[in-house]
Image (spheres, grey):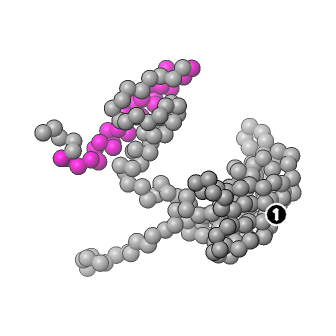
Amino acid sequence: MGGIGSGRVKTASVSSDNRRSIDLKVIHGAYEGALGGVISYEIAGWPVGRLTFRVDPIKLFFSWEWEAKEYRCNDGVIELCATSCYFGGVRYWYICPSCERRAGRLYQSELGFYCRCWVGVVYQSTSETKRARALRRIHNIHEQLKLPYRGLCSRVPKPKGMHLSTYATLMERRARYIGEYVGYLPKSLTQPR
């Protein structure tokens, strides 16, 4: 028991970055008094589709059109709900048509738009290696510092207006992530000759 080929077979899951979706953050402006609008989607500067939507207090009416022949125009209605925020205001959520779960983003499937759990979509970060995760975190720190990525060994100056304690915390994290990144390199690359 437990030999080669035994155990669970890993199936390739579709990443959330590779699925068409309706993100509530993109449509957020509709709740600020506007009743609807059109959002155009582009890939490398080429138009690939558009989402036309209209909002009333409890529903989002949409028409989803893609240039690709594999997807036809989908019209639909998605229910919305609102939760009150701790410091005031309201946060809106989609209600998944199948499982009635609250979600901030719905993903397209063959039958319509559903939540991540129902469609079977996983987050991109769940399939990252430890080395790739460390490098992504280093890049995120460089974005927080508003600097272009210049390599792991370059000196990173403190941005004007940033508190010294915030800068020190970011530099400590950066050093830790660089250590994690270098720790996952093969021994032949990390040892001097």
Residue in front for this viewpoint, 135 or 86 = 135
Q: Give the amino acid at mark 1.
A: Phe
Q: Quadrant of residue 47?
A: bottom right
Residue that appears at 72% across and 41% down: 86
Residue at the front extreme? 46
Residue that appears at 71% across and 56% down: 40
Residue that appears at 78% across and 69% down: 76
Q: Is residue 184 left or right of residue 70?
A: left
- Residue on which disc 1 sits: 61
Judge whether 6 appears above or below 117 on screen.
below
- Which region is colored magenta? 161-188
Q: Is residue 176 magenta?
A: yes
| Secondary structure, magenta segment, majority class | helix
Task: Indicate the position of residue 113 as horizontal and vertical percent values.
Answer: 69, 68
Task: Indicate the position of residue 187 as horizontal and vertical percent values.
Answer: 19, 47
Q: Is residue 181 left or right of residue 62?
A: left
